[in-house]
Amino acid sequence: MRELVRYLLANVYVDFQGDISMEKVREFLREDDSREARSLLSKLIDDKGVDDLLITIADCLRDHIAEGITEETIREQLTMYSES
């Protein structure tokens, strides 16, 4: 059983349901004047969309599944992405 659990954790696939556009991200960040929000929006503009963000965040969140994915975990990943 332990080997199966390890295998499943190592091979879990994270994806996001629904369609999110650059316009939708701007809508979410409209009221947020934080440095993190501005940095993320700037990175997304440089990347010409959200596709790279979604792939990168999903891949990074895999590492956190065993201990749990929280809002703080996602915030940290978004900040790291925007600073990359």
Image (cartoon, rainbow, N blue to C red):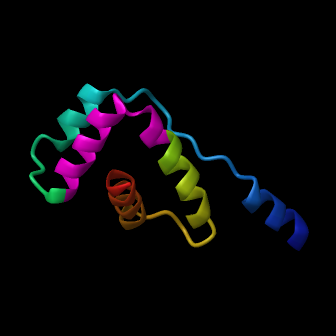
Residue 1 appears in the rendering: no
Q: Is residue 42 left or right of residue 68?
A: left
> Residue 84 or 38: which is nearer the viewer?
84
Residue 55: give x, y in percent of width and height: 52, 41
In the displayed structure, would residue 79 be above or below residue 43? below
Residue 27 appears in the rendering: yes
Q: Quadrant of the N terminus?
A: bottom right
Q: Is residue 32 left or right of residue 56?
A: left
> Residue 55 or 64: which is nearer the viewer?
55
Q: Which quadrant of the figure has residue 6?
A: bottom right
> Residue 54 or 71: which is nearer the viewer?
54
Q: Where does the magenta region start and end?
A: 36-54
Q: Which quadrant of the figure has residue 76?
A: bottom left
Give yes or no for residue 40 being in the magenta stretch.
Answer: yes
In the image, what residue occupies the spot 56% across and 66% down?
64
Residue 21: give x, y in percent of width and height: 33, 26
Count of numbered tags: 0
Residue 62: give x, y in percent of width and height: 60, 57
Residue 9: give x, y in percent of width and height: 73, 61
In the image, what residue occupies the spot 12% across and 50% down?
32
Q: Is residue 51 left or right of residue 46?
A: right
Q: Main secondary structure of the magenta part?
A: helix
In the image, what residue occupies the spot 66% across and 46% down?
13
In the displayed structure, would residue 21 be above or below residue 13? above
In the displayed structure, would residue 37 be above or below residue 41? below
> Residue 26 or 2: which is nearer the viewer?
26
Give yes or no for residue 27 being in the magenta stretch.
Answer: no
Q: Which quadrant of the figure has residue 43?
A: top left
Q: Quadrant of the C terminus?
A: bottom left
